[in-house]
Amino acid sequence: MPNILILGGDGIGPEIMTEAKRVLSCFQNELSFTFIEKPIGGAAIDTHGSPFPKETEEAALQADAVLLGAVGGAKWDGLPLAERPEKGLLAIRKTLGLYANLRPLTIWPQLVGFSPLRPERLKDVSFVIVRELTGDVYFGEPRGFKEENGQRSAFNTMIYTEEEIRRIAKVAFDLARKRNKRVCSIDKSNVLESMRLWREIVENTHREYPDIALSHLYVDNASMQIIRQPSSFDVMLTPNMFGDILSDEAAVLSGSLGLLPSASLGGQSALYEPIHGSAPDIAGRGLANPIGMILSVAMMLDHSFHRPDLALKIQKAVSTVLDAGLRTADFWNEGTEKVSTSQMGSAIEKEITSDIVGVRK
Ligand code: IPM
Ligand code: MG
């Protein structure tokens, strides 16, 4: 019986998680899973004094899969970095060994009008960012602040080992084999030693994948090509920090940051979360878009429970609901129907249930 850990987190996290659970419950008969819920991020700081309490860590280590909403908020901004809500997210990624973060970009034909790009630029756009998730300047040591001669300075270390690069490169090449067989690796090897090694190891690893076409872009150029020619990408392989930045840029091509799911893999279990943040400014008002979270449930059903059929049911339901013109506030315009977070969730739930009932009949 699969055991799913639910981590709502902060801001809009708990609201979108309610909708994710609603959607997941449609498949209770197929999967008979159990949920447990634990605190993480700012909510955990408030109740347990730590963004990643021991009980959350233990539950994560026992879970078959983890669903996470979002963490962070202005309330905890004054805390030292090591105690902030974000630390909870970084700690769970590291503890579970989730070094491979998959962020697929889907352009929904119903939503091209919301994209900052003209519709013709979005033709044939579909790519996945494979972001390295447990290395780089996010985790590199030494890091910190120091004071010398009355002057403060602060420093971080951008570091990758060969093995860290090799294993994430393999994830990208393996994924490309199931797609259009193209990998574009992003680095800054014209300036940074860690990125020189990145490029060298990606090229070495590529020798085992002669069927995959490999190209390289410096990160500054990549950020331009995402806008100029997004259809040129199939699998985009990135270090941790560059992947964080480029995935927000890519997400907005779809019309709203609220639409993109992600899967973090590589450990014994896996974690699924939307790529957006906790949006504290709109929290608790029914304005949040639950689709990125709901599509993260679809990624979980596919990757962790090997049920691509059920994942497809969710994707189809989302598409039908978008066809019907339902929109949360982040991507609403005249002529479409503005709905709340929970109305969006229940419309998707309804589609899935009628699909299941239809099949059973
Ligand atoms: C993301 C987020 C996180 C990250 C933050 C909240 C720590 O921006 O998942 O993209 O930087 O990885
Ligand atoms: Mg980010």
Image (cartoon, rainbow, N blue to C red):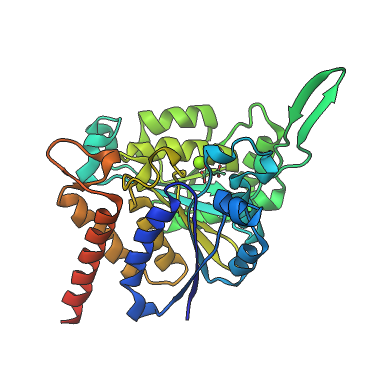
| Residue 210 seen in render | no
State whether residue 109 is above or below residue 268.
above
Give the residue at x 21% y 65%.
350
Q: Nearer the viewer, residue 13 or 135?
A: 13
Occupied quadrant, residue 254:
top left
Q: Nearer the viewer, residue 207 or 112?
A: 112
Q: Position of residue 70 (x, y in %)?
A: 48, 50
Q: Position of residue 237 (x, y in %)?
A: 52, 45
On screen, residue 201 versus residue 22, left or right, reads right
**Which quadrant does ligand 1 occupy?**
top right
Q: Nearer the viewer, residue 81 or 44?
A: 44
Q: Residue furthest front?
A: 47
Give the residue at x 36% y 32%.
229
State whether residue 358 is above or below residue 220.
below
Give the residue at x 42% y 72%.
306
Q: Residue furthest left?
A: 335
| Residue 220 seen in render | yes
Q: Nearer the viewer, residue 284 or 156?
A: 284
Q: Position of residue 206 (x, y in %)?
A: 57, 50
Q: Quadrant of the C terminus?
A: bottom left
